[in-house]
Amino acid sequence: MAYDRYVAICQPLHYERVMNRRACVQMAASAWIGGILYSTLHTGNTFTVTFCAGNMVDQFFCEIPQLLKLACSDLNLSEIGALIFSACIVLSCFVFIIVSYVQIFKAVIRIPSEQGRHKAFSTCLPHLTMVSLFVCTAIFAYLKPTSSSASGLDPMVAALYSVVPPMMNPVIYSIRNKEIKSSLRRLTDGRLFANN
């Protein structure tokens, strides 16, 4: 999506040529193939780990850090490799998004009209909001010290990053719709007047 916004704003005359059906299919296929390879790697590594700490996962879904808490042995080399591979994928996607948006913001700042700048920023804002929401909640979930957090907090943190961004996705993307805006205004105005 960052690439789509980049092409739409930085190369608007080439948009139809660059973002054609073939390019969209290639991007979608690469995302699906990458996800399948990523999950296959972790699933294969999970089958190589021996578990001895019981079978109760302190989570509402099987997550790799929770499974590793149940492992008898230390992290084996393949699991460390999988975690490094995961970090590289996440970091490369994040860097790609950041570089795309830096290019977009540089192009938007050069737009002479204020209305054009506003339109370009409003095009990018929903995607940037969703990426930021997901990244911030995932960082909060994965980069917190394990010893300082209570185990009861882990399911709430997992729900935060796995439920909140998808739930907010339609709200954030549809807030640009004029009908939705007017409905929200009527709803909030009606509630404000009802409370007074």
Image: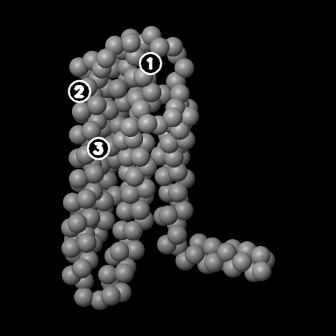
* Identity of the residue drawn at 23% across and 26% down: 81
Instruction: Kindly report the distance in space between the C-alpha atoms of the residues bearing marks 3 and 1.
Output: 25 Å
Badge 2: few (under 14), some or many (20 or more) residues near its Cα, within 10 Å? Answer: some
Q: Which mark is residue 70?
A: 1
Residue 104 occupies quadrant: bottom left
Q: Is residue 178 above or below residue 153?
A: below
Label 1 is placed on what type of residue?
Leu
Residue 33 visible in the snapshot = no
Q: Is residue 104 above or below residue 159?
A: below
The quadrant in which the C terminus is found is bottom right
Q: Position of residue 3 (x, y in %)?
A: 27, 59
- Closer to the chain start, of discs 3 and 1, is 1
Q: Nearer the viewer, residue 148 or 3?
A: 148
Per the image, label 3 sits on a secondary structure element best described as helix
Q: Are marks 2 and 3 in contact (CB under 8 Å)?
A: no
Q: To which residue does mark 3 refer?
A: 90
Label 2 is placed on what type of residue?
Gly
* Identity of the residue drawn at 21% across and 67% down: 103
Q: To which residue does mark 2 refer?
A: 81
